[in-house]
Image: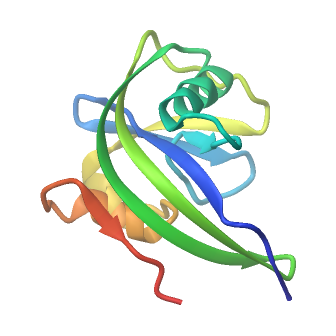
Amino acid sequence: MSAAATELIARAVIRAGDRILVARQRGKKFTFLPGGHIEPGEPVEHALIRELAEELGTTADIGELVGVVEHGYTDADTTHHEVNLVFTVNVDGEPISQEKHLEFLWLPIDELPTTDLRPAALRDALTDGHATPFWRRWDH
């Protein structure tokens, strides 16, 4: 089994009333927060603005750091390690998927605890009601 390099990922908590925007790959059941990989040398906030424009076709105003979640998983015999930097974000306009492989859903916040939002530690941090910012380490 091989290990991939650590990936830095910027994620957005986008709220509309009592709903939160989540993403899902078409054909998959699990969800995740919008955002994506930070390119080498790219400032985190720039990466998040770029990713949201690519995914949602919107401009974004980055707010406060919500927290940091370290996560790991294995697929196709490769162990992945990622650090998710999570921010509150406001977007202009209605988010509409710009990528054929992704769909976006407004999830009622009260359904978050029972939703397969990955990483699970991020879902738990968003629903546990503790003050931000939070840190969740990878317990492997």
Relative to 114, residue 73 above or below:
below
In this rendering, would 95 be left or right of 79?
left
In this rendering, would 99 be left or right of 24?
right
Relative to 52, residue 72 above or below:
below
Q: Residue visible at 54% across and 90% down?
A: 140
Which quadrant would residue 114 be assigned to in this image? bottom left
Between 43 and 22, the residue placed more toward the observer is 43
**Residue sitting at the far front:** 41
In this rendering, would 79 be left or right of 106?
right
In this rendering, the count of numbered labels is: 0
Q: What is the image's colouring?
A: rainbow
Between 40 and 81, the residue placed more toward the observer is 40
The image shows residue 43 at horizontal and vertical percentages of 55, 34
Relative to 50, residue 84 above or below:
below
Relative to 136, residue 90 above or below:
above
Between 44 and 16, the residue placed more toward the observer is 44
Of the 4 image quadrants, the one containing the N terminus is bottom right
Q: Residue visible at 29% across and 57% down?
A: 126
Which quadrant would residue 111 be assigned to in this image? bottom left
Q: Residue visible at 53% across and 52% down?
A: 32
**Residue sitting at the far top:** 93
The image shows residue 106 at horizontal and vertical percentages of 42, 35
Q: Residue visible at 68% across and 24% down?
A: 54
The image shows residue 104 at horizontal and vertical percentages of 56, 35
In this rendering, would 79 be left or right of 125?
right
The image shows residue 7 at horizontal and vertical percentages of 66, 59
